[in-house]
Image: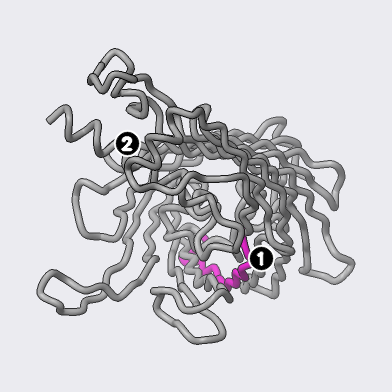
Amino acid sequence: MMKSRIFLSFCILCSYLSTFAQTSAPKYSNEFLEVGVGARALGMGNAQVASVNDVTSGYWNPAGLNGITTNFSVDLMHSEYFAGIAKYDYAGFAKRIDSSSVFALSMVRFGVDNIPNTTELIDANGNVNYDNITTFSAADYAFLLSYARLSKIKGLRFGGTVKIIRRVVGDFAGAWGFGFDLGAQYEYKHWKMGAMLRDATSTFNAWTFNLNDQMKQTFLATGNTIPSNSLEVTLPRLLLGISRKYEFLNNRFSIAPELALDATFDGRRNVLIATSVASIDPHLGFEAGYKNFIFLRGGVSNIQTETDISGNKFTSFMPSMGVGIKFKSFTLDYALTNIGGLSAALYSNIFSLKIDINHKTI
C-alpha cells in the first residue's frame, strides 16, 4: 500500500510539471480562478455576474462594488475539496472612495499541502530509502486589485480588476502571471443585467523550472518529458447575466433568480451549448429572503454529457444550495456543493463571513 501511494504521488508530480511545459494556449488554464468565491455565490451555482453587489464583486464583476453602501467591507471564506485534500481560501477588502467610486483588494489561494516528494526515493546505489521522502505544496495564488465607478448614465456602472497570479510547485517550479478583467452592470426598474470580460487581453503566466540532475534522470527513466521554461496563456471568456428581484407581502419576502452564461471561444467544450464558434456554460441560481435577515439559496451549474461504463450517455450537473443570516453588520453564509453530482464523497462545505465596517449609508 505504501509503495502504491508513493508511486501515485510521483506520477501526480510528473504530470503536474509536464502540463505546464507548453508554449501554446491550453484550453484549461488558471482553472483555480473558475471555482468562485463567497458562500452566497457558490450556493447559487456561481450565477453572480448581474446581481453581485458586495466585496466579492472584485472577483465576480468589479462593477458590482458600487453596490456597497458602507465605508468598509471585509469578506473571508474557507472551503475544502476532494475530502479535505485541497484547501481553498479567499479574503476580500473593499473601501468606498466617494459617492461614486469604490476600490477593493482580494486574495485567493487554492493549494494541496504535504505532497510526498519521491523523486529521490532511490539513491545512487539503487537502494530504496524512505528517509529521502520529503513533502511539498502545490499552490495557486491570485491577488486582485479592483476599481468601480458609477456612469453618468442612470443605472449603469462599470469597473476593472488587475490580477497578479503566483503559482508554485514546491521548489521545482513556479510562475508569475498578469492580466485584467472588465465588467459592467445595468439596472432598469427591477431588472439587473451584467457583463464581464475575464482575462480581457489574455492572462500570461511565465513558468520557470528548477530540477536537479537526479530529478532529470528520474523523469527520463520513467518516460516523462523534462519541462522547460515556458509561457502559458489564458484566453478571454465572456460572462453574461440577467436577474430580477420579486418582493411579496409588504416586502417581507423576496426571491431573486439569476441566469448567467459563461462563454468561451477556444473550441468546443463539454458544456450544454457547444458550437464551433463558442461554448456556452449556463448557470442558474436563486436567492429567497425573509425580512432581509435569513436567506435560502440554490443553483445548478456545470451541465455536461458523460458516458458511463456501459457506453450509455447521460447528463450530469453540479447542484448547490446554501443559507445565509444577516444581523446588523455581520453576514454569515454557508453553501453545500457536489462536484459533478455523482458521489457523496465529493460534497464540499463552504463558509464565509462578511463584515460591514462603519455602517454609514452613502
Give the quarter of the figure containing the N terminus: top left
- Res 328 visible: no
Along the horizontal axis of the image, is 165 left or right of 300? right
Spatial separation of the CA atoms under disc 1 and disc 2: 39 Å
Q: Could you say which quadrant of the image residue 287 lies in? A: bottom left
Q: Earlier in the sequence, mark 1 or mark 2?
A: 2
**Residue displayed at 78% across by 44% down:** 103
The prevailing secondary structure element of the residues shown in magenta is strand
Q: Secondary structure at mark 1?
A: strand
Mark drawn on residue 196: 1
Q: Which residue is mark 2?
A: 10
Identify the residue at horizontal 57%, vertical 45% (top origin).
228
The single residue placed furthest to the front in the displayed view is 125
Residue 186 location, quadrant: bottom right
**The residue positioned farthest toward the top in the image shown:** 131
Span colored in magenta: 234-251
- 192 vs 307, left or right, is right
- Circle 2 sits in a helix, a strand or a loop, which is it? helix
- Residue found 73% across the figure and 61% down from its top: 182
**Contact, mark 1 vs mark 2 (Cβ under 8 Å):** no
The amino acid marked with disc number 2 is Phe
The image shows residue 250, relative to residue 307, as above or below, that is above
Q: Position of residue 356 (x, y in %)?
A: 64, 35
Amino acid under label 1? Answer: Met
Q: Is residue 27 left or right of residue 107?
A: left
- Relative vertical location of residue 315 with respect to residue 344 in this rendering, above or below: below
| Side of 29 relative to 153 (left or right) | left
